[in-house]
Image: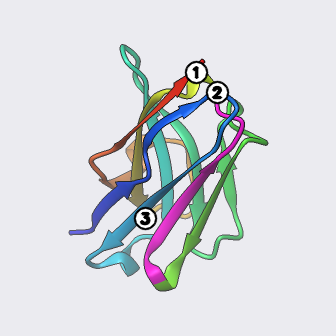
Amino acid sequence: QVMLVESGGGLVQAGGSRRLSCVASGPTLSTTIMGWFRQAPGKGREFVAAMDRSGGITNYADSVKGRFIISRDNARNTVYLQMTNLKPEDTAIYYCAAGRSAVPTSRSSQYDYWGQGTQVTVSS
């Protein structure tokens, strides 16, 4: 069982930056893709960004392109989400996920493991 623990959430002003981290433990070599999803109050979970194991292939939601960057440090079993120019609509619980798909997909059903989430609140 792969365990995922997110950190780095908090309160930030609009226009500010924040970096989220997700540390994976357990049989992490069984997973090939890592992703970030988010869920705002009263809304469904939506895809944010994903990356393959090598870091050579990334995938971003249109709403965060140019503002968020996903990266990973395989030696530390950690994936990051660097968020810049944050907007109030970015307020959500952010979840880290891991899966075994061949490509870093935006489909949540392709992810087998999920973290508990970390809250990001952007004030206007």
The answer to the question of whether label 1 and label 3 lie on touching residues, with beta carbons closer than 8 A, is: no
* Quadrant (top left/top right/bottom left/bottom right) for the N terminus: bottom left
Q: Residue at x 58, y 21 (%)?
A: 88
Q: Which residue is denoted by mark 1 in the rendering?
A: 88
Horizontally, is 46 left or right of 23 in the view? right
| Image x and y of residue 116, in percent | 27, 47
In this rendering, the answer to whether 74 lies above or below 62 is below
Q: Which residue is denoted by mark 3 in the rendering?
A: 100
Residue ranking furthest to the left: 1
**Region of the chain picked out in magenta, as a range:** 76-86
The answer to the question of whether label 2 and label 1 lie on touching residues, with beta carbons closer than 8 A, is: yes
In this rendering, the answer to whether 18 lies above or below 15 is below
Amino acid at dot 3: Arg
Closer to the camera in the image, 17 or 6: 17
Which secondary structure lies at badge 1? helix
Which secondary structure lies at badge 2? loop
- Marks 1/3: CA distance? 32 Å
Where residue 16 sits, quadrant-wise, is top right
Q: Which residue is denoted by mark 2 in the rendering?
A: 14
Q: Which residue is drawn at 36% across and 44% down?
A: 118
- Marks 2/3: CA distance? 35 Å
